[in-house]
Image (cartoon, rainbow, N blue to C red):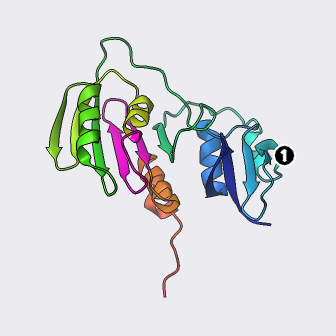
Amino acid sequence: MSDTWTISVNGRSYGPYTVEQMQAFAVEGRVVPQSLVARADDNQFHAACDDTVLATLFRPAAPAPTPIRTPQFFTAEGDEPQSFGRMEEESPVGHRTHFIIVADMKSRSISGLEEEIFNLGPAYPIMPQAWLLSSDMAINVVRQTLVQKLGKLDVLFIADATHDKAAWFNFGPESDTRIRRIWQKIPEALVPRRATG
């Protein structure tokens, strides 16, 4: 039996993801007991709570003595509903958030993306394919808006400097895992290393 899973959202498949990635998705609320999943060696999707390994991710844990605020971040590989890619509250009216947006455009023109960034609020190009944006929109709204201007090969990373959040698009699974580890500030000593040679 395979130790990786594919997630089905609106008829589109995402993955494969390792158990560690699935655990992170469950903690973030992006994978819930009713999420449709299939092991990599199986084409039949079923509820995540019906998978013997994933079911353990949804059991209530003992409450932590003190709440620890971890950074929130969202990934996307296309349009996805709220159950996969938790939506966050809009910023209060008049409250501006500062974003740093970096893109690597390979399949589309940068001008369409740049125009959309300037439509979101005051923005300034700080270097080629990088902008500083001030907006009252939530990070996932900014991401979803900008993703519409990207092609299949284009990459996007957004850092919310005000709320310590990040969002990205079109990174592969290995990059996704590395970004999460850095953003969650997991010490390098705890990160398993690949054997070389």
Along the horizontal axis of the image, is 127 left or right of 163?
A: left
x, y percent for residue 172: 48, 59
- Residue designated by label 1: 50
User: Which residue does the image show at 74% across and 44% down from the upper left?
Assistant: 36
User: Which residue does the image show at 40% across and 57% down from the upper left?
Assistant: 153
52, 36: nearer the viewer = 36
Residue 15 figure quarter? bottom right
User: Which residue does the image show at 72% across and 35% down from the upper left?
Assistant: 62
Along the horizontal axis of the image, is 41 left or right of 196?
A: right
Q: Is residue 192 above or below residue 83?
A: below
| Residues shaded magenta | 147-169
Instruction: Identify which amino acid the numbered label 1 is placed on.
Output: Asp
Along the horizontal axis of the image, is 32 left or right of 141?
A: right
x, y percent for residue 168: 42, 46
x, y percent for residue 111: 23, 42
User: Which residue does the image show at 68% across and 46% down from the upper left?
Assistant: 8
Helix, strand, or loop for circle 1?
helix
Q: Do we see residue 186 in this rendering?
A: no
Q: Is residue 13 above or below residue 91?
A: below
x, y percent for residue 5: 69, 56
9, 65: nearer the viewer = 9
Q: Do we see residue 98 in this rendering?
A: yes
